Image (spheres, rainbow, N blue to C red):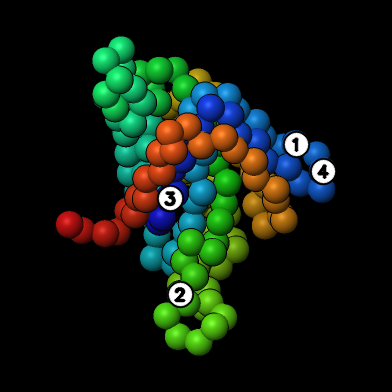
Amino acid sequence: MRAVIQRVSESSVSVEGETVGKIGKGLMVLLGVTGSDSESDAEYLVDKTVNLRIFEDDEGKMNLSLRDIGGELLVVSQFTLYGDARKGRRPSFIKAAPPERANALYEHFVVTARNTVKRVESGQFQAMMDVALVNDGPVTILLDSKKEF
């Protein structure tokens, strides 16, 4: 499971001109699911996301987490995070999970996050979405539940 985490002062997601999710200060998460992912991958990424110390403390150091500041979370599914463009000019999405599996794990991520964070909004799975955000910093972090360092 992959996540692109962006620290935002505000963010929203719309489908066909209608806002389906909107947050203020917090994190916007683009979430991709691969075929080998499980609920434990989702739980790992939720824990990592809400506890990342990427918000500034009183001294201006990134020392506070989303939980510390009482921030909000917007989660948007994005299968293109598993696009492979190393060959040719058109990305292959063969590593992205099938829609049924991806949706189940995306929903598990959202439910798990709602049990951890005060306010969690989400996009609409498999919809064409317009995502708007004001990236605060900018601060953008990439997370992957399978990568070992």
Q: Which secondary structure, mark 3?
A: strand
Which circle marks residue 19 in the picture? 1
Element class at badge 2: loop
Residue appearing at x 72%, y 56% in the figure: 128
* Residue at the image point whose x is 58% and y is 24% from the top: 24
What's the distance in space between the residues labelled 1 and 3, CA to CA? 22 Å
- Check disc 2 and give the amino acid type: Asp
Where does label 2 land, which residue? Answer: 84
Counting residues from the start of the chain, the first of labels 2 and 1 encountered is: 1
Whole-number angstrom distance, CA of label 2 to CA of label 3: 16 Å
Residue 37 in the figure: left or right of residue 74:
left
Label 4 and label 3: CA atoms lie apart by: 25 Å
Asked if the residues shown at circle 1 and circle 4 are in contact, with their CB atoms under 8 angstroms apart, the answer is no
Disc 1: CA contacts within 10 A as few (<14), some (14-19) or many (>=20): some
Q: Distance between the residues labelled 2 and 1?
A: 30 Å
Asked whether the residues under the numbered discs 4 and 3 touch, taking CB atoms below 8 Å apart as contact, a structural biologist would say: no
**What element does badge 1 sit on?**
strand
Count neighbours of disc 4 (C-alpha within 10 A) and say few if under 14, some if 14 to 19, many if 20 or more.
Answer: few
C-alpha span from label 2 to label 4: 30 Å
- Determine which of the numbered discs, if any, sits on residue 17 in the image: 4
Residue 112 appears in the figure: no
Q: Residue furthest right?
A: 17
The type of residue carrying mark 3 is Ala
- Answer above or below: position of 80 versus 63: below
Label 3: how many residues lie within 10 Å, few (<14), some (14-19) or many (20+)?
many
Query: For numbered disc 4, what is the local secondary structure?
Result: loop
Q: Whole-percent x and y of residue 145?
A: 32, 53
Q: Name the residue under label 3.
A: 3
Residue 4 visible (yes or no): yes
